[in-house]
Amino acid sequence: MTKTVLLIEDEQNIVEAVRFILSRDGWDVRTHANGLDAFDAVRRRNPDVVILDVMLPGRSGFDILQDIREDETVGNVPVLMLSARGRKEDIETAKRSGANLYLTKPFSNEEVLNAVRDLVTE
């Protein structure tokens, strides 16, 4: 059975790179680029893993993560946060908000692939 990843990211080059990496490994990669209705996309698609950018148009990834964690239906979905912001405060905020993992951009293909694989085996 194919596992689904929902990638919530507004940078097209990141979307294309992550889609390529994960699709080649057999993942069904769905994408969403707007923070305003990203939580609705998570509920509608009910993915096995969410990859969530911190800085999105309309709403912060931290706010979206909080919505996910408070929801009975999708609250346990593993979330990998991606950000160009690698400050200690951002990483701590992500962990406090319920992120399973946090990667900073730029990242390697192997980092993303291993992180997603690890999240579904936890």
Image: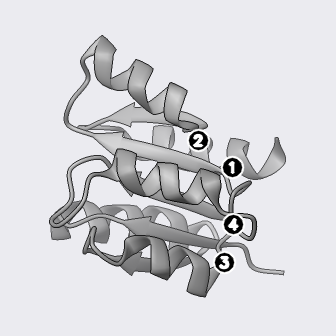
Q: Amino acid at mark 3?
A: Asn
Q: Which residue is mark 1?
A: 117
Q: CA distance from mark 1 to mark 2?
A: 5 Å
Which quadrant would the N terminus be assigned to in this image? bottom right
Q: Kindly indicate whether the residue at mark 4 contacts the one at mark 3 (C-beta within 8 angstroms).
A: yes
Q: Which residue is mark 4?
A: 74
**Rendered position, 25 above or below 113:** below
Q: Residue at x 52, y 65 (%)?
A: 22
Q: CA distance from mark 4 to mark 2?
A: 19 Å
Q: Amino acid at mark 1?
A: Arg
In the image, which is nearer the foreground, mark 1 or mark 3?
Answer: 3
- Closer to the chain start, of discs 3 and 2, is 3
Q: Which residue is mark 2?
A: 115
Q: Amino acid at mark 2?
A: Ala
Q: Which residue is mark 3?
A: 46
In the image, 11: left or right of 98?
Answer: left
Binning the other alpha carbons within 10 Å of mark 1 as few (below 14), some (14 to 19) or many (20 upward) gives some
Q: CA distance from mark 3 to mark 4?
A: 7 Å
Name the spot of residue 41 as percent of width and height, x first: 47, 81
Q: Amino acid at mark 4?
A: Val
**Rendered position, 15 above or below 60:** below
Q: CA distance from mark 3 to mark 2?
A: 19 Å
Name the spot of residue 102 as percent of width and height, x first: 45, 33
Marker disc for residue 68: none
In the image, which is nearer the foreground, mark 4 or mark 2?
Answer: 4
